[in-house]
Amino acid sequence: MSQAVAAPPPAAPDRNPRPRAPKRWPLATMAGVLALVPLANIGWDAATGGLGVEPVEALVRRTGWWALTLLVVTLAVTPVRRVTGWNRLIQIRRPVGVISFVYALSHFVIYVAIKQWFALSFIIEDILERPFITAGFITLCLLTPLAATSTRKSIRRLGGKKWRRLHWLIYPAALLGVLHYFWLVKADTRPPLVYAAIVIALLMMRLDLPAPFARKAARSDSAEPAPSRS
């Protein structure tokens, strides 16, 4: 009669387990949180009386400034990624772009609800007769479909080619946003001119990159992951 082979004793637990690597926040999450910090700061100042002697004007100007600034950051993502080869940078484009729209929408809502008290006739008159408000309103109209189609589901529904064509509207939106800013300021026009120079430079980089960067861009563009089907 054969004897049963005894099972080996269980291994002793490791008394010195390896420390787990700390979890890293996704780049998109960090960018989104950072982009929302100014909005939280604006809300805090509004709640604590920190907006100065003209609080409504301060709300309008600060939300507008951050809308334009984050829009320019969104525009800069692809050229910077192509030049540096840091493809992970593309992860921040969607959250920063959407939050830029949140600031732009807040900018408009403050103007409509607080500055004009929903006086529709005055709002329409402003849009039609004051050029800087006309430019700002058109900018918001251009940004709205971009924010609405920022999801992967929208990319699948529209198709990559149509989606990319639609999202080229970000360039006229940015230029009109700069024009809105330029017409708004009355004394120092240097800040909007700086924004204009940056937007034009970014547009030129998208249209005509130097050859080495263009080859790298073509490879990285073709390597971008397709939207998931789940």
Image: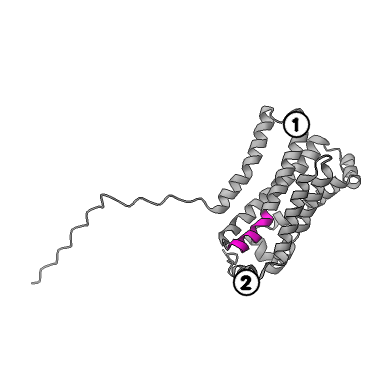
Residue under the image location 14 percent in, 63 percent down: 6
Place residue 89 in its image quadrant: bottom right
The quadrant in which the N terminus is found is bottom left
The quadrant in which the C terminus is found is bottom right
Are discs 1 and 2 less than 8 Å apart at CB?
A: no
Residue under label 2: 215
Q: Is 162 situated left or right of 223 in this image? A: right
Closer-to-camera residue (143/65): 65
Residue 74 percent across, percent down from the top left:
67, 54
Amino acid on which the number 1 mark rests in the picture = Pro
Chosen colour scheme: one colour
Residue under the image location 62 percent in, 70 percent down: 212
Amino acid on which the number 2 mark rests in the picture = Arg
Question: Which numbered disc flags the more N-terminal residue, 1 or 2?
Answer: 1
Residue 16 percent across, percent down from the top left:
28, 50
Residue 215 percent across, percent down from the top left:
62, 71
User: Circle 1 sits in a helix, a strand or a loop, which is it?
Assistant: helix
Residue under label 1: 55
User: Circle 2 sits in a helix, a strand or a loop, which is it?
Assistant: helix
Closer-to-camera residue (80/6): 80
Q: Please rate how many residues cluster around mark 2, counting C-alpha atoms within 10 Å: few if below 14, some from 14 to 19, many from 20.
A: few
**The magenta stretch spans residue 75:** yes
Closer-to-camera residue (160/58): 58
Secondary structure that dominates the magenta span: helix
Distance from disc 1 to disc 2, alpha carbons, whole Å, reads 50 Å
Q: Which residues are magenta?
A: 74-84
> Residue at the left extreme?
1
Label drawn at residue 36: none
Q: Is residue 196 above or below residue 223?
A: above
**The magenta stretch spans residue 80:** yes
Residue 48 percent across, percent down from the top left:
66, 28
